[in-house]
Image (cartoon, rainbow, N blue to C red):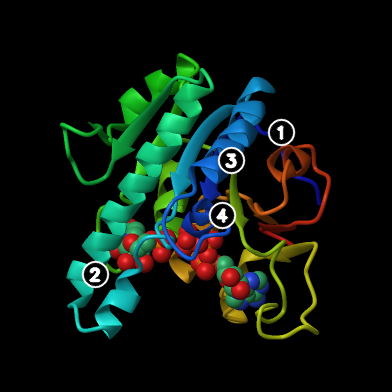
Amino acid sequence: MALPEIKRVLLKLSGEVLMGEQEYGIDPAYVARLAEEVKAAQETGLEVCLVIGGGNIFRGVAGAARGLDRTTGDYMGMLATVMNALAMQNALEQQGVPTRVQSAIPMSSVCEPYIRRRAERHLEKGRIVIFAAGTGNPFFTTDTGAALRAAEMNCDALLKGTSVDGVYDSDPKHNPEAKRFETIAYDQVLSANLKVMDATAVALCRENDIPIVVFSIREKGNVATVLAGEGTQTIVQKEA
Ligand SMILES: Nc1ncnc2c1ncn2[C@@H]1O[C@H](COP(=O)(O)OP(=O)(O)OP(=O)(O)O)[C@@H](O)[C@H]1O
Ligand SMILES: O=c1ccn([C@@H]2O[C@H](COP(=O)(O)O)[C@@H](O)[C@H]2O)c(=O)[nH]1
């Protein structure tokens, strides 16, 4: 089954891809490359919402494992996503694309707070809106933040650009025999406990009938390829 016509998209980029070939942090050259792809998507006439993960800087659960309490680790993770959002805003604006960052945790000297109607206005004016700080709550992820904003902003699809090129029947990083699905139902992802995206995010997309496209953002030009319905990807939707 093909995707419905997409006029407004939520693009969720893994934080880990921002580090490029480094072991952690932000590689400005790589962020510039990603910004070019986002710009190209917008130039096709799409309204673009962005969410960027924080895995290149901080993961709450890893912090908790090292002795921080979970909620502190999660807030640190959310702050990491704000840093990534600012880096992407900078890269987009250097390429002439007006961009606003809205954070789920208000920090008025740094960026706007999340206000849905204001985000709508930015999109109408041709700005890209980057939603930072996930849901603003610990115990969640930026995938869930992305699903939530996609629902609130009435996006036609959620594109998850990550380090793998789709949803497999088991983790392809651990099982070289894993098989990729072309399409898969939300229910199947949830019942088989496939870990490519957290269950809350998948359930939220299912409730709101938002197709999820999982694709590799490591491959240059893939955002355009996927939006054109080409290349390698998995579409998660109501029916496989
Ligand atoms: N069944 C599966 N199919 C595909 N990938 C899977 C599967 N199970 C586990 N994975 C893993 O899911 C990971 C992608 O999700 P993950 O949440 O780690 O990254 P992300 O959301 O892109 O990054 P970030 O958290 O930095 O935003 C891949 O690294 C892949 O190895
Ligand atoms: O709504 C949210 C979003 C994120 N977090 C914390 O941030 C890190 C980084 O996000 P990723 O989705 O893993 O890239 C995440 O591990 C959580 O610790 C959060 O608490 N709430």
Q: From mark 3 to mark 2, how far is it between C-alphas?
A: 27 Å
Q: Are marks 3 and 1 in contact (CB under 8 Å)?
A: no
The residue mark sitting in front, 2 or 4, is 4
Q: Which mark is residue 20?
A: 4
The residue mark sitting in front, 4 or 3, is 4
Provide the secondary structure element on which disc 4 rests.
loop
User: What residue does disc 3 label?
Assistant: 34
Q: In the displayed image of the protein, which residue is found farthest to the top?
A: 125
Q: Position of residue 13 (x, y in %)?
A: 53, 50
Front residue of this view, candidates 27 and 165: 27
Query: How crowded is the residue under tag 3: few (<14 C-alpha within 10 Å), some, or many (20+)?
Result: many
Q: Position of residue 130 (x, y in %)?
A: 41, 36
For the point 28% across and 32% down, which residue is it? 115
For the point 65% across and 21% down, which residue is it? 43
Is label 2 within 8 A of ligand 2 (CB to nearest ligand atom)?
yes
Which of disc 4 and disc 2 is earlier in sequence? 4
Amino acid type indicated by mark 3: Leu
Which of disc 4 and disc 1 is earlier in sequence? 1
The residue mark sitting in front, 1 or 4, is 4
The residue mark sitting in front, 3 or 2, is 3
Q: From mark 3 to mark 1, how far is it between C-alphas?
A: 23 Å
Provide the secondary structure element on which disc 1 rests.
loop
Amino acid type indicated by mark 4: Gly
User: What residue does disc 2 label?
Assistant: 73
Amino acid type indicated by mark 2: Gly
Q: Position of residue 136 (x, y in %)?
A: 25, 53
For the point 47% across and 52% down, which residue is it? 147
Image position of 103 with respect to 44: above or below: below
Provide the secondary structure element on which disc 3 rests.
helix
Front residue of this view, candidates 59 and 230: 59
User: What residue does disc 1 label?
Assistant: 5
